[in-house]
Image (cartoon, rainbow, N blue to C red):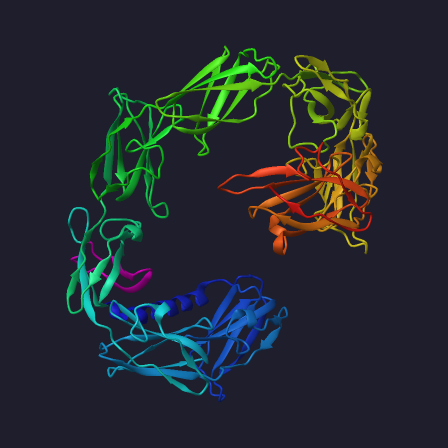
Amino acid sequence: MSRNRLTRLGYAVVAGLVLAGALAAPATAAAGGTVQGDFTTIDDGPIADAYVTAYTADDEWLAWAYTDGQGHYQFTDLPAGGIKLQFDINNLQQWSPGKRNSADATVYQLASGGSLTVDERQPATGTIAGHLTDNPPYFNVTATGVDQPAAVGGYAVDSGDWSIPVFPGTYKIGFNWDGSKQWAVGSVSEADGAVYTVAAGQTTTVDDTKLPTGTMSGRLTKVDGSPLADVWVSLFRGDEQTGWNVTDADGRYTFGEVIAGEGYTVAFDADGQERQWVPGVRSQQQATRFTVTAGEPTTVDDSQIAPATLHGRLVGEDGTAKSGFAVEILTDDQDHGLNYYGTTAADGTWSVGGIEPGGYRVSFRSPTAQRTQWAYGKDTEADATVIDVRSGGDVTVDDTWLSGGTLVVNAVDATTGAPVSNFCVWADLPTGMGADGCTTGSSVTVDDLAGGVYNLSATPDSDSYYLRSDSQSVTVATKQTTTATVRLVLGGKVSFTAKDHTSGAAVRRACGVFLVLGHGGLGDGYGNCTDATGKVTTETLATGTYEMFAVAPAGYGHQWVGAAGGTGDQKAAARIKVKAGRTIAAPGVLLDKPGKITGVVSDAAGAPLADVDVAYSAWGDAGPSWDTATDEHGVYTIDKLGPYGWPLLFGAGNYPREWSGHTGNRFQAETVPVVAGGSTTYNFTPRTTASLKGKVTSPVAGWRIHAFNAVTGDQMGTFDSSTAGPGGSYELPLAGDQKVKVDWSYYQEAGPSAQGWYQDAADIDSAKKVAIPAQGAKKLNLKLG
């Protein structure tokens, strides 16, 4: 049966096209015009029974038509717009006018209710012809395009002679029969096939000899042993399908002749089931590779997959049952397989049924999810045993939960060394697995940890004045106790009250954002919010001087908190000094009714600029958060602003970030007055004046640099390695006439990352200033690391 494969597929395709043309609606329902014409040979002879396809300019299918005995075709009711036409006769495909692919086709414009005449002439063809020695009584020949996509088929006569008309170009020749496929000359791989050039009006001869063959056949059965009838069976050599058949009433099939060699796999598709590969697996990766010997039969039988069961028992090293542990059964073939899950019972036993055949790794995760062990007794999936599960199998996987390591964490005051009580710790591995523990004392113990290097941090109780500790590394060994000390820094807190500026009534849900003085840019999010009495005390902050931004609830405008009322200018905000071990009262948050700012951002020629970022704060670590963007008309609107003067920050595309008034220094920015309940218009035209440029030398490919205004600390520019030029060259647009400080970072998925400041500085305060000219570029080469 497999000998008829190409003929049957060809019929199925044509039949499908007839139905599609007859029943499917056009891509666009609106009635339109008519497209017609004649399809002729290079000598102007009519080409009958060719099918013609109409597409939109974007290659969406519209309709099919066939040429009549005079080569004439016609489409009616096509939608108005761009039309492309494809012509196909015996798989010789061309796009009007005489092009080989859609990209080169002409887009014909069809008016609503109009008519187009598009005559098409087939370009000159050449011929590939030859003889297959020792040929089977039937075989198909395919010319596959090399320089242009093409797959032109033909059939051989009993003598083994064949001939295919093709367009000029380069081709490889394939021969198909039964379960065999070979490429000229004498190759089983298309990649190894010879390339032949065909010229117009010329014949290229390709002779070949049939390779030695054996035969392959078999029988498929259901789980109960009864025949598996009417099932499609496929034969593959590597990833290439070389044959197919359908099982008969007794479940038998044959591929007929198969070219001798190794690496064959067999698959079958039963109704309603995922494809099965022989013997009883779901992926080709796991399938048996069969070898066919010349002149010999190869038998490949199989039975439908029967679900398997995995079960076992998990105990400790002392033999006690481990209950409540999660069991994960993970396939070794993540592209095709399935994963399964279970839980150990009170006696440590577990069982999971309905498992497909394949290779699996089994893991056990502790009830606290702080540790995972892989069968048998391994810490990583890579070291786990791959367990072979066969169709209908019952596999036992018993394991012993090995003792982990113990981590004892002591907390002390970073200055005095005195013990600190009431805290929690979190320790995690780079894999994401981790564990935590809390104590009311000054020491906490975390048990049953996997061995490895952990990131350890401590978080004091919410009532404490101590800050969360920085992360530190600690190495834990299994069956050993490791002691670590975390040094906690004493901070302070801020209390504030929010009121209606006019009535004095308490305001609920006013939230504070505290920014260290000299570091512009609000972060992403905000802190504690006031309760029904209008009062709140913050979480612990590091000691230092802060500015406070109040995020207003509905009906009020945001503000920077001043000494006696709100302001829109960050530099006018009150200075709040946080002291160690104390709660400091901030000035009252006196909230006013909101107004808004709107305007148009356009280029120097007056054209509107879309997607321009407009913000009322400098960018924070995560980018712009307190902002909006212009629409397609260049229009922006920022609402919920308190009725004060606000500087605005503009940034887009190749333009530098600029504060209103065209400056990189927020302290020199023009402020835009906001009126309570009103709208203020402020239009802006960005300028390209200056830049920072040079080359970045980095130990890794992924890096990023930022430029911060040296006076305000505002982030005024960002450049990423993804847009760097040859040799790490960069050019960062910046507002002219400002001094900046530059930080850098590099990052990689596997390996160390780093961050620093120019020039070899530890932080922004000690970083070197770089003067940006009013016009032109400042050159700065950076070496990272």
Question: Considering depth in this image, is 472 or 532 the residue closer to the camera?
Answer: 472
Q: Is residue 95 left or right of residue 278?
A: right
Where in the figure is residue 696, as x and y percent of width and height? 64, 48
Location of the C terminus (image quadrant): top right
Q: Residue at x 29, y 33 (%)?
A: 375
Q: Which residue lies furthest to the front in this view?
A: 760
Q: Quadrant of the N terminus?
A: bottom left
Residue at 23% in and 40% down:
308
* Image location of residue 588, percent across then percent down: 77, 17
- Quadrant in the picture for residue 170: bottom left
Q: In which quarter of the image is residue 386?
A: top left
Residue toward you, 725 or 672:
725
Residue extending farthest to the bottom is: 43
In the rendered picture of this protein, how many numbered marks are placed on residues?
Answer: 0
Q: Can residue 568 be seen in this view?
A: no
Q: Which of 391 and 184 is in front in this view?
A: 184
Decide if residue 627 is in sight here: yes
* Magenta run includes residue 250: yes
Range of magenta residues: 228-251
Residue 167 appears left or right of 81:
left
Q: In this view, does 20 lie above or below 490?
A: below
> Which one is nearer the viewer's eye here, 524 or 665?
665
Going 68% across and 41% down the picture, which residue do you hit? 706
Question: In screen coordinates, is 610 left or right of 82?
Answer: right
Q: Where is residue 633 in the image (x, y as percent from the top left)?
A: 74, 50
Residue 710's place in the image compared with 604, above or below, is above
Q: Is residue 430 magenta?
A: no
